[in-house]
């Protein structure tokens, strides 16, 4: 996929997350995305089918916005209950993604989703430690990550 398309996706996500579509914010998004892509460009896989990769990246972006909305709703419902019945905790998530780029992307997507926070990655890069506001069903949360973000990341960025 062309780095320019990825950069435009980064800028679009930045504008959506920041909630401001001003010239200064667009320029800031372009500068930060250029620096970020400059740092990771050697880790991005090449390929002949740019359109397929673009659709996979767009699918990941759409999944992120869906998960963002769903988890924001869940957290809002959770904290507005008269009795806060949660079991916060940290759990170990076994990683399938392998590159630094993929691990960082997964950790950031988890952190940007309300109710979860990536805490640390093991030294062997095989485990991601995640804090969740409610750890009552850890296996379901692991399955959501595995079948959601991690699967989409591997589809979009597998070399």
Image (cartoon, rainbow, N blue to C red):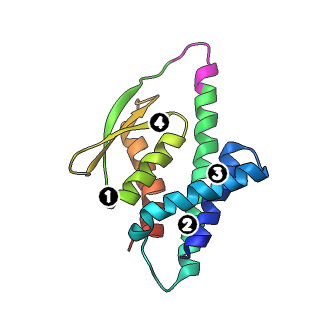
Alpha carbons under labels 1 and 2: distance apart:
18 Å
Alpha carbons under labels 3 and 4: distance apart:
20 Å
Nearest to viewer (mark 3 / mark 4): 3
* Badge 1 or badge 2: first in the primary sequence: 2
Nearest to viewer (mark 3 / mark 1): 3
Say which of 78 and 32 sits in front.
Answer: 32
Alpha carbons under labels 4 and 1: distance apart:
19 Å
User: What's drawn in magenta, residue-wise?
Assistant: 78-84
Nearest to viewer (mark 3 / mark 2): 3
Which residue, given by chain and number where applicable, does mark 2 sit on?
57
Q: Secondary structure at mark 2?
A: helix
Q: Position of residue 90 (x, y in %)?
A: 34, 31
* Badge 3 or badge 1: first in the primary sequence: 3
Which residue, given by chain and number where applicable, does mark 3 sit on?
14
Q: Position of residue 21 (x, y in %)?
A: 77, 50
Examine the rendering and report whether any part of residue 34 can be seen.
Answer: yes
Q: Secondary structure at mark 4?
A: strand
């Amino acid at each position: 996929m062309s780095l320019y398309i990825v950069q435009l996706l980064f800028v679009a996500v930045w504008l959506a997350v920041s909630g401001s579509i001003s010239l200064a914010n667009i320029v800031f998004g372009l500068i930060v995305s250029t620096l970020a892509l400059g740092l990771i460009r050697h880790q991005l896989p090449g390929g002949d089918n740019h359109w397929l990769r673009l659709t996979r990246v767009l699918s990941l972006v759409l999944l992120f916005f869906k998960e963002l909305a769903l988890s924001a709703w869940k957290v809002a419902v959770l904290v507005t209950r008269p009795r806060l019945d949660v079991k916060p905790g940290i759990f170990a998530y076994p990683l399938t993604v392998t590159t630094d780029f993929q691990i960082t992307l997964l950790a950031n997507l988890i952190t940007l989703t309300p109710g979860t926070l990536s805490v640390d990655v093991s030294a062997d890069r095989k485990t991601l430690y995640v804090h969740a506001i409610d750890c009552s069903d850890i296996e379901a949360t692991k399955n959501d990550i595995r079948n959601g973000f991690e699967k989409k990341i591997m589809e979009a960025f597998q070399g």
